[in-house]
Structures are given as C-alpha cells and as structure tokens.
C-alpha cells in the first residue's frame, strides 16, 4: 500500500524526463496516485506523450489564459471527478533576461515572468475552487528556488517572480484553509533541467550548488518527488503555507 492510494492528482509543468514535475509524478505514482497531466500546447504534448502512454491522462492547459485553465479543469472534473491535489510546476522568463544584470529586464519581460511564474498559481487555485474540483482535504504544491531569497547570478527576474510565488503560497494557504486545502512550496536544489539550462552560466550554478550540499552530491528527482508525495498525503496535514527546502543543505550556507 502507498500513502497516496486512491488519490487523483493533477501535475502541471512536465516538459521531459528531467523535469522536476516528472520526478514528482513518478514518485506519487509509486505511492498509488492516479496522475493527470496538463500540457501547454501541441508542441509540449508531443514531449509529454513520450512519457505518458495514456492519452486520456493528458489535458491541454495554458496557464496564461483563464479560459484555458477553466476549460482544462472542467474536462478533468468531467473525466475523472474531483481531485485530491495539484502540483504547480510552471515558470517562464525570457532567456535574454536570465543573464548578466537585472537592469536588462524589460517591463514586458517582468510582467511575463510574474504572470506565468507567480500569478498562475492564483489563477489555477481560483479556477479549481470555483469549479469545485478539489476534495476536502486536498493539497496544492508549487515549486520555487533559493533565488527568491538570495541574489543568485543571472537568476534575475525569475528570482523576483519566485519571491512573489512564495508570498502567494502564504496568502493562499490562509484563505484556502477553511476549504480543507493545504498550500505549500518546495524549494528544490539546482539540477540540470530544461528550466535551469535557460539561465546564463548555468554550468557554474550547478557546480557551485553541488559543492555546497552537505555530502557533495546533487539532489535527485526522486528526493524532490518524495517530498511532493509527502505533501500530497495525509501525513502532512499539519504543514501549511510553508516552503520546504529539498536541496541537500545548500540553503544553509
């Protein structure tokens, strides 16, 4: 038996097999969960389809559009019924603004990063609530990074967006609690994902991050996914509005 037996969980943000979202989905599946995947567009569907054989589990959802979110969640409820959790693993910023100085950030780029990386958590939660998609109890988990607290080289506008995302977690946790919905974030250590490779100097970032772990070993998808499974389970009912570090101690230094 697994800690997520009979649970249905939506995972948003799988890009490929190196995605943290995929690591979360894999570990939750091992614990008995039925996972439903959302993808942004047809191009991304092709990537996710290489990992997920059942097309019924794939639902299109562009989080920059409220209409798309509502359509996706309506389809999910019709096809699967109410769900027990949502993993929000979505972030985006223009690549040219993830290098050098934050002074290169444009107004449009700043707005885009905030919309996709931070506001989307509010939009997703609101839609799920309005459509009565979430069971009571339920859990929402998003992914953040230490660049929300420290000025990590080249992380720039994404660090600002992640800081906003973490604030959203706290306010959502306060307001969703009365409906039995827990909201938390995982601050994952740096690892080679599609998102990280978009950051200028990412090789140095990965090297330094590994050196600062307590055992000189980078965090794994399985370790991050295991924490996500815990936060989706009944074992974590006392964890609310928190940011849990899964970075092998990098944040200690």
Image: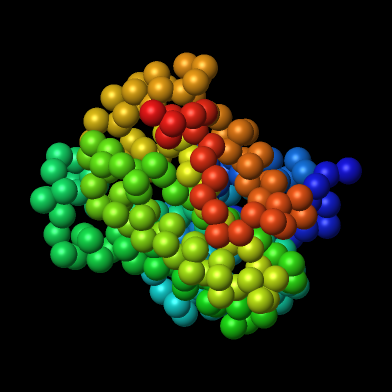
Residue at far right of view: 1
Decide if residue 203 is on the left or right side of residue 18: left
The foreground one among 81 and 44 is 81
Q: Residue at x 49, y 62 (%)?
A: 169
At horizontal 58% and vertical 43% (from top left) the residue drawn is: 22
User: Quick check: 122 left or right of 175?
Assistant: left
In the displayed structure, would residue 10 be above or below residue 74? Answer: above
Residue 12 is left or right of residue 84, and the answer is: left
In the rendered view, tell whether residue 239 sits above or below residue 246: below
Q: In the rendering, at what x and y percent does residue 173 appear?
A: 56, 66
Q: Evaluate whether residue 180 shows in this view.
A: yes
Residue at the far bottom: name it: 130
Above or below 157: residue 146: above
Q: Residue furthest left?
A: 103
Give the residue at x 47% y 16%: 216
Q: Position of residue 59 (x, y in %)?
A: 58, 64
Residue 16 seen in the current view: no
Left or right position of 52 against 63: right
Query: Which of 35 and 88 lies nearest the eye of the viewer?
Result: 88
Q: State the residue at coordinates (37%, 54%).
A: 162
Picture colour scheme: rainbow
Q: Quadrant of the C terminus?
A: top left
Quarter of the image with the N terminus is: top right
Q: Name the spot of residue 120 as percent of width and height, x first.
A: 43, 67
Task: Give the x, y percent position of residue 20.
Answer: 52, 42
Q: Which of the 4 image quadrants contains residue 200?
A: top left
């Amino acid at each position: 038996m697994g800690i997520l037996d009979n649970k249905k969980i939506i995972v948003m943000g799988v890009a490929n097999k190196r995605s943290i979202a995929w690591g979360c989905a894999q570990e939750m599946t091992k614990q008995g969960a039925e996972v439903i995947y959302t993808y942004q567009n047809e191009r991304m569907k092709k990537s996710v389809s290489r990992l997920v054989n059942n097309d019924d589990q794939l639902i299109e959802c562009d989080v920059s559009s409220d209409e798309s979110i509502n359509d996706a969640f309506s389809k999910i409820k019709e096809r699967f019924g109410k769900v027990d959790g949502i993993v929000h693993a979505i972030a985006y910023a223009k690549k040219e603004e993830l290098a050098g100085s934050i002074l290169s950030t444009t107004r449009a780029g700043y707005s885009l990063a905030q919309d996709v990386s931070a506001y989307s958590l509010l939009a997703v939660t609101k839609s799920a609530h309005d459509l009565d998609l979430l069971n009571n109890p339920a859990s929402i988990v998003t992914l953040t990074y230490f660049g929300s607290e420290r000025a990590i080289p080249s992380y720039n506008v994404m660090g600002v967006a992640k800081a906003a995302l973490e604030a959203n977690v706290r306010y959502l946790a306060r307001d969703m609690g009365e409906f039995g919905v827990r909201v938390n974030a995982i601050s994952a250590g740096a690892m080679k994902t599609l998102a990280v490779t978009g950051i200028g100097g990412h090789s140095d970032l990965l090297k330094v991050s590994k050196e600062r772990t307590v055992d000189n070993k980078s965090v794994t998808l399985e370790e991050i996914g295991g924490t996500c499974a815990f936060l989706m389970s009944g074992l974590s009912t006392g964890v609310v509005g928190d940011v849990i570090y899964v970075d092998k101690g990098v944040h200690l230094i």
